[in-house]
């Protein structure tokens, strides 16, 4: 499918693997110049190498930036002055009870998950408005709706993204710039594969059996009844990056297999 994106430039944070990496691959195939991001040189270099091997025409570059470090964020903004597409994908989480989660953990997760997207959006949105074209996407999570009691801090960061995106959409009123949220559900990332393999080993069964049990007992609201692939999520993200999605602004688009229910 031609998404009319040839010649555009995109930055995807936290994109050396998972949904970010899959999105980068699709955008590269559409002729987008893509800047991927990770916290260390080796992971970024490996991701760039893999993308170039999978997409022969790839114009892909790596930027190392740890969003814990404000000076590294500043360096990123100095290195990459303007872009057409910003995908705020980077995120960290922990799994602890509410009472055992230190306030510092809350601060760290808000710094990386939310404030990184605020800083980048504040920088790049001005140029998008001046050029009258741009896309800002916030990659949220079904946890913004289905809040696990051991991941309240993470869920709060993702829910906050929705408010920021909607506010930015109002700023773009009457322009060809849009701001939207994508809500993935349970997705078969590297971490999810490890989870399934570890549980299968622990209970002497197969990863497929663990997956079935997960959706029968832990994620009973899912209509899909399986993990979505990273490509399935990335396809939706790529569409929202394109001019074809120009009538979608200030919206929340769910790719969660129906797990969070409702239409909002």
Image: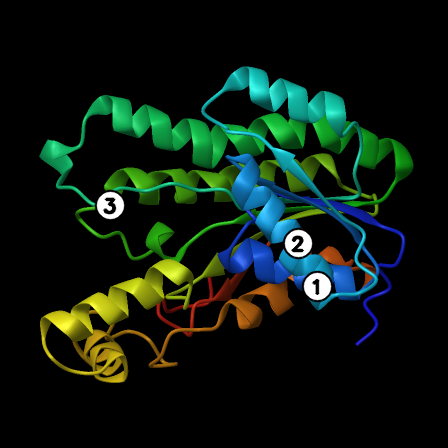
Q: Nearer the viewer, residue 14 or 244?
A: 14
Q: Residue at x 11, y 70 (%)?
A: 202
260 left or right of 132 in image:
left
Q: Is residue 3 at least partly visible in the picture?
A: yes
- Badge 1 crowding class, 10 Å Cα cut-off, few under 14, some 14 to 19, many 20 or more, is few
Tell me the residue that label 1 is attached to.
53
**Residue at figure coordinates x 44%, y 73% from the top left:** 228
At horizontal 56% and vertical 36% (from top left) the residue drawn is 41
- Residue 73 occupies quadrant: top right
Image spot of residue 7 (x, y percent): 89, 52
Q: Residue furthest top?
A: 71
> Rounded to the nearest whole Å, what is the CA distance between mark 1 and mark 3?
37 Å
Camera-side mark, 1 or 3:
1
Please give the residue where the numbered disc 2 appears in the rendered image: 49
Q: Secondary structure at mark 2?
A: helix
Q: Where does residue 82 sit, x and y in percent of width and height? A: 80, 32
Question: Horizontal and vertical percent for residue 19?
Answer: 53, 59
Q: Residues within 10 Å of mark 3 (few under 14, many from 20)?
A: some
Return the residue at label 3: 151
Quadrant, the N terminus: bottom right
Give the number of the disc on residue 255: none
């Amino acid at each position: 499918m031609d998404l009319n994106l040839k010649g555009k430039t995109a930055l995807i944070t936290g994109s050396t693997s998972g949904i970010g990496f899959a999105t980068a691959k699709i955008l590269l195939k559409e002729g987008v110049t893509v800047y991927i991001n990770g916290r260390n040189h080796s992971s970024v270099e490996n991701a760039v190498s893999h993308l170039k091997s999978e997409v022969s025409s790839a114009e892909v570059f790596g930027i190392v930036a740890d969003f814990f470090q404000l000076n590294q964020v500043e360096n990123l903004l100095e290195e990459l002055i303007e872009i057409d597409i910003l995908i705020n994908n980077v995120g960290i989480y922990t799994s602890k009870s509410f009472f055992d989660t230190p306030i510092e953990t809350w601060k760290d997760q808000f710094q990386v998950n939310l404030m990184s997207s605020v800083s980048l959006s504040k920088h790049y949105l001005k140029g998008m408005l001046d050029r009258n074209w741009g896309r800002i996407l916030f990659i949220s999570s079904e946890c913004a709706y289905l809040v696990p009691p051991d991941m309240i801090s993470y869920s709060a960061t993702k829910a906050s993204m929705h408010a920021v995106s909607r506010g930015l959409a109002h700023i773009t009123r009457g322009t060809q710039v849009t701001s939207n949220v994508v809500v993935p559900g349970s997705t078969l990332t590297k971490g999810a594969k490890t989870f399934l393999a570890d549980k299968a080993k622990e209970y002497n069964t197969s990863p497929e059996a663990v997956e079935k049990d997960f959706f029968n007992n832990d994620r009973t609201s899912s209509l899909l009844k399986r993990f979505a692939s990273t490509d399935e999520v990335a396809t939706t993200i790529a569409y929202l990056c394109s001019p074809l999605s120009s009538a979608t602004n200030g919206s929340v688009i769910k790719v969660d297999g129906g797990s969070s229910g409702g239409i909002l």
